[in-house]
Image (cartoon, rainbow, N blue to C red):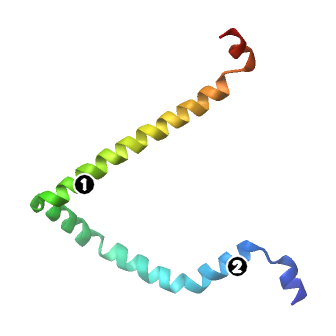
Amino acid sequence: MKTFYSKWNYLSGISRVFTHMSTTLQACYELYANNYSSALKLLHNLENTSPGFRKFLENAQQMYSFFEYLLLLLFSLLIISISISISDLDQI
């Protein structure tokens, strides 16, 4: 028992949780995978028949595009900060 606890870390605890839940996770994934085509048909049906749902999807797409733009801007700023050296800043 001492050997077990001497080698224990937080990953051991996480792995035990996933091992314990593996059958439940597998069952959930099977339900998801088996119902994917039905869910896709439902989404297409709602998009074609529900103006409110269609508006929701349009708003979600706009928000996604906005966040995608912000991430691109953030990454650009990170790259710029790496490429500018102290000597470059002295010349500005």
Q: Quadrant of residue 21?
A: bottom right
Give the residue drawn at x 18%, y 61%. Answer: 44
Query: Which mark, by number, is residue 22?
Result: none
Give the residue drawn at x 14%, y 64%. Answer: 45
Q: Which one is nearer the viewer's eye here, 48 or 62? A: 62
Give the residue drawn at x 19%, y 60%. Answer: 53
Residue farthest to the top? Answer: 91
> Disc 1 to disc 2, how far (Cα)?
39 Å
**Percent x, y of residue 5:** 84, 83
Residue farthest to the left? Answer: 49
**Percent x, y of residue 91:** 69, 9
Q: Quadrant of residue 90?
A: top right
Query: Which mark, by number, is residue 13?
Result: 2
Q: Is residue 42 above or below residue 16?
A: above
Q: Is residue 32 left or right of residue 83?
A: left
Return the residue at label 1: 57
**Percent x, y of residue 87:** 74, 14
Q: Amino acid at mark 1?
A: Leu
**Percent x, y of residue 14:** 66, 76
SS at circle 1? helix
Q: Amino acid at mark 2?
A: Gly
Indicate which label's residue lies in the foreground, 1 or 2: 1
Q: Quadrant of residue 52?
A: bottom left
